[in-house]
Amino acid sequence: MVTSQQALKKYGDPNKQLNMVVWDVPGYLEIGVIPKKIYCNRDMIAPLTQAFTNLISTNYVLELKTYDGCFNIRKKRGLTSMSLHSWGIAIDLNAFENGLNQTPKLSPGFVKCFTDAGFEWGGNWQRKDGMHFQLAKI
């Protein structure tokens, strides 16, 4: 699991936003609620492209109801360490039904679209965060 210490070491102070870009999502991926532009870490572009492609090709994109963000400089909810959203290397989806410490409602096939693309899923953690996907490696 990528830690905030590892992200700080690789990307530096999140307030400087050194590795952040506005990703103009290719038109062929703009299906349903997949946004046209995402402000994210440049290291997210290839894995997100693959994850969105996986969702579309398997039709799990129909389960994607809300895109709830990527970049947000903040601490992890209820903790003192920084969220990986602070470096734009995490994304939240379908937050309305996948809250912190709740039983996640994303299907295994939907989750696989992201884990196969290099993401770790918060729904597998002891402190469940079913809306959350983050890069598995940086």
Image: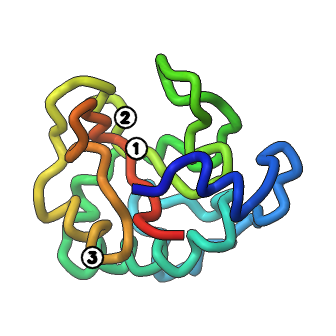
Disc 1 crowd rating (10 Å Cα; few below 14, some 14-19, many 20+) is: some
The residue sitting at 79% across, 55% down in the picture is 12
Q: Is label 2 or label 1 in front?
A: 2
The residue sitting at 20% across, 71% down in the picture is 59
Q: Given the image, on which type of amino acid does mark 2 rest?
A: Ala
Could you give the CA–CA distance between mark 2 and mark 1, rounded to whole angstroms? 7 Å
Outermost top residue: 78
Coordinates of residue 74 in the picture (x, y in percent): 65, 31
Coordinates of residue 34 in the picture (x, y in percent): 47, 60
Could you give the CA–CA distance between mark 1 and mark 3, rounded to whole angstroms? 21 Å
Which mark is first along the chain, 1 or 2? 1
Coordinates of residue 109 in the picture (x, y in percent): 13, 64
Q: How many marks?
A: 3
Q: Mark 1 sits on what residue?
A: 66
Q: Secondary structure at mark 1?
A: loop
Marks 2 and 1 in Cβ contact (< 8 Å): yes
Q: Is label 1 or label 3 in front?
A: 3
The residue sitting at 31% across, 67% down in the picture is 114
Residue 95, labelled with which disc?
2
Residue 116, labelled with which disc?
3
Task: Tell me if 54 is positioned left or right of 42 in this view.
Answer: left
Closer to the camera in the image, 25 or 21: 21
Q: Secondary structure at mark 3?
A: loop
Position of the N terminus by quadrant: bottom left
Which mark is first along the chain, 3 or 1? 1
The residue sitting at 66% across, 39% down in the picture is 72
Residue 11, labelled with which disc?
none
Which mark is first along the chain, 3 or 2? 2
